[in-house]
Structure formats: structure tokens, C-alpha cells
Amino acid sequence: MCRNVRLLLALFVAGLLTAAGSRTAGAAPPEGFRAVFNGKDLKGWYGKVSSNPAEFAKLSKEERAAKIAGWAPDTVKHWTVENGELVNDGDGPYLLTEEEYTDYELLIDYKTVARADSGIYLKGTPQVQIWDYTDPSKFSLGADKGSGGLWNNSAGAPGKDPAVKADKAFGEWNSFRIRQIGARTTVWLNDKLVVDNAIMENYWDRKSPLFAKGPIELQTHGGEIRWRNIYVREIPAAEANEILSKSAAEGFTSKFNGTNLKGWGGATDNYEVVDGAIRCKAGHGGILHTEEEYANFVVRLEFKVPEGGNNGLAIRTPGTGDPAYTAMCELQVLDNEHPKYAKLDARQYHGSAYGMAPAQRGFLRKAGEWNFQEVTVTGSKIRVELNGNVILDTDLSTVTEYMANSPHPGKDRTSGYFGFAGHNDPVSFRNIQIKTLP
């Protein structure tokens, strides 16, 4: 990124933070944002008794509508609009947006009272915490640390506690800026960074990633809280990828110059550089790999699959043979939703350690769009994060069952090249960066 672009980005971010800290009631949305609360009524919102959104989604459309209708009288009893402010008396159902969001930025102001305890659910999941930070009875729960943390993350997990206490005194308006890319969540409270790109855990099922999309949900809990100036900006894929690639970027080294295959070995004749990306030639295959070998490392890259496309990331490959078996593993790169792949083994879908460990599905962008992926390899463990969502976190040394009962003799390799498996489809890769780990 050139200096001028960095400067413009910094000014843009600074402008957002300034706007977040100085909004008044009924203020116009900042550029790129749109209001999701009209300041007049509850249009675009509905009340819901807190429950697992995955279970709610299993209901038929008619059953969900009936549930919402049943909660409606209690919703309007406890949620009102006064002077452009959304007011809750501390009781009743929670209030959710009818719209659902994937990658987005939320601006929202709130004002609460002593002894109240509230929060903002993201994608239907608790929560960005709002505390009475002066209440000693809740200091053991973390109230003394202030608001803005991802309180329902596991103990000691990044983001559970806010980095700084940024709450204003009771009677004053507080302003949140919340950015969520996949499960990667960043929170500013009153212009101060309190959570920095932390994974928000799926409270409802901690073994699964956060939901791919979901509503913004305002929690009611024990005291009056007022909300205003609720604005959302959906983040396009290119910007999301850029943000993810720039986060905690220290120690990464670029492995592709964007022009040619200098620094790469193996099946170089079967790959080409097109529009700044490495692409497997249609109808060709073979392993293209780095010149250096790696033991423990993190690799970040963007990839794009054509419709029905198939390739793979060769992890600790010797550079020969089928990397699904001769390398530590092949991490599948696949257009999951193409009809021809409808009946695969679960261990064959995108992000899976091929034939050994299945990845979570539902987080891949449509064919033809660029995805961001980060893979961490430490010892026998592999962690795959796709578009900000952890879809695989496994220890291959514990694998005892293999697809088609075919063992993987390479899975215990402790070092090797990083590369692309090549399966005859024009799958593209770019912005490839690697960081060596101890």
C-alpha cells in the first residue's frame, strides 16, 4: 500500500472515530453508513426471547412468524421511542434487526443507569458487554474493567476483557464503533480501542464457529437503557481481505512478487501469473512449491476458485507424489457448493485436511470472489481460518480413521515445502505471505 493510500485510510478511520464520539440525536449517518433505526418507531426490528438462533432457524417460516407475533405485545410494552431515542425499561424481549449481516461496521450510541447490565449481541450471539462499572457487586465478573469486552468469550480468551476502561459517567451518551469480519471483532468505545480483532466465540456451541451471518440484537437487563444513531455499513470482500491481511502483520514475508514465479519450484510450467495472481493452467496440475522448507509457520493468502474449481494447499510437502498422502496434509481448496460435489465425504470439502479431518462449511464466498485464508501449522496441529472464521482446528496426530481406509504416511512429517496441489482447474492465489514460528 502506497504512502498516500495509507494516509487517506488513516484519515478515513480518524474521521469515523471522531464522528462516533461526537454524534448528536438524529445525526445524519457518516458516509457509507445507513440508519437501521428510523428514530420514530420499531419498523425493521422485532422482539425475541433470547435463545439459540440456530434452533430458531430450524423452525418453519410460519412457526417463526407465530413466535414473533406472540412476543410482540411484550415488545411494545417495554420498548418505546422518545425524542428519536430507542428506550427499553430494563425488561421484556430483546430487540433484533430484521436484516442480517455478514461483514459489517456498526455505529451505535447508548446511555444507561446505575445497576443496569446490558449488551449488544452480534449475529445473534452474546455479546459486547455494557456494565455498571461502578457496582462492586459485579467486580468479580469484570464490571470494574469497563464496557466493550466480548464478555461471553472463554476465560482468558482474547477480547473477553476490554483493553482499557472507556465508559463515560452515567447520564452521558457513550458511542460504540464495532467492526466484525467473520468472527473477527474489533470494538471502539468512546474513541478508544477496547477489543482488537479478537475471535468472537459461538456461545451457543463453542466447538463451532460464530454464525456466518445474523442480526444485531439489543439486550435488556435490569435497568433503563437508551439507544440512538444506529448505523450500519456493510464491508465489501476486498476491504475485508485487506483488513484481515494487515492485522498483526509483523513477521510475515511476501512469497510472491506478483509478476513471475521467481522463488517457486516444482511444476512451474503448469502455472502462470495472471493479473498479479498465480493461477494453475487449465488442464494441468502438479505441485508448485516454495524454494524454502518450513517446520512451524503461518501462511496468509487470498484465493479464488472458478465454478467447480478444485486445488489444495500442500503443507510440509516433499514436492513429489500426491500431497494428500505424501505431505503432512493437503488442505482442500474447493468450490463447495457446486452440484458435482454434493455427495463428497465431509473430509473433502474446503479447508479440510483431505481424507483426515473435516472443516466447517458455510464460510466460503461465491465462486469467482476472492477469499482470505490463514493457516497455522505448529507441530502436528493445524488451524485454518477462512474469511475471519476458524473452520478447522485439529491435531493430526490424533487421527485414526481415514477416508476410504487409506492411511496418510506423510502426516507425521515435521518439515517440508509449502505449495499448491494443482488439480487441472484455473484456481488463483495472490498476496501470499509466510511467517516462520519457533
Image: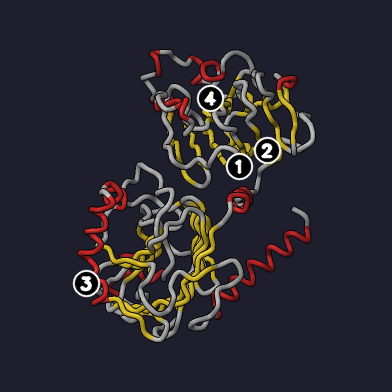
* Secondary structure of residue under mark 4: strand
What residue sits right under mark 2 in the picture?
430
Amino acid residing under circle 1:
Trp
Q: Nearer the viewer, residue 379 or 64?
A: 64
Q: x, y percentage for residue 255?
A: 71, 35
Q: Are marks 1 and 2 in contact (CB under 8 Å)?
A: yes
The Cα–Cα distance between marks 3 and 4, rounded to whole angstroms, is 54 Å
Tell which of 42 and 291 is nearer to you: 42
| Lower position in the chain sequence, tag 1 or tag 3 | 3
Residue that appears at 27% across and 63% down:
48
* Residue matched to label 4: 330
Horizontally, residue 301 falls left or right of residue 171, namely right
Q: Amino acid type of disc 4?
A: Glu
Q: Residues within 10 Å of mark 3 (few under 14, many from 20)?
A: few
Q: CA distance from mark 2 to mark 4?
A: 18 Å
The quarter of the displayed image where residue 281 is located: top right
User: 3 or 100, which lies in front?
Assistant: 100
* For residue 281, above or below residue 91: above
The answer to whether residue 437 is seen in the rendering is no
Q: Amino acid at mark 3?
A: Pro
Q: Is residue 87 visible?
A: yes
Q: Residue at x 39, y 18 (%)?
A: 402
Q: Badge 4: how crowded within 10 Å, few (<14), some, or many (20+)? A: many
Mark 2 or 4 closer to N-term?
Answer: 4
Residue under numbered circle 3 = 73
- Mark 4–mark 1 distance (CA, rounded to whole Å): 20 Å
Q: Earlier in the sequence, mark 1 or mark 2?
A: 1
Residue 289: percent from left, percent from top = 67, 25
The residue that disc 1 covers is 370
Name the spot of residue 100 as percent of width and height, x first: 42, 57
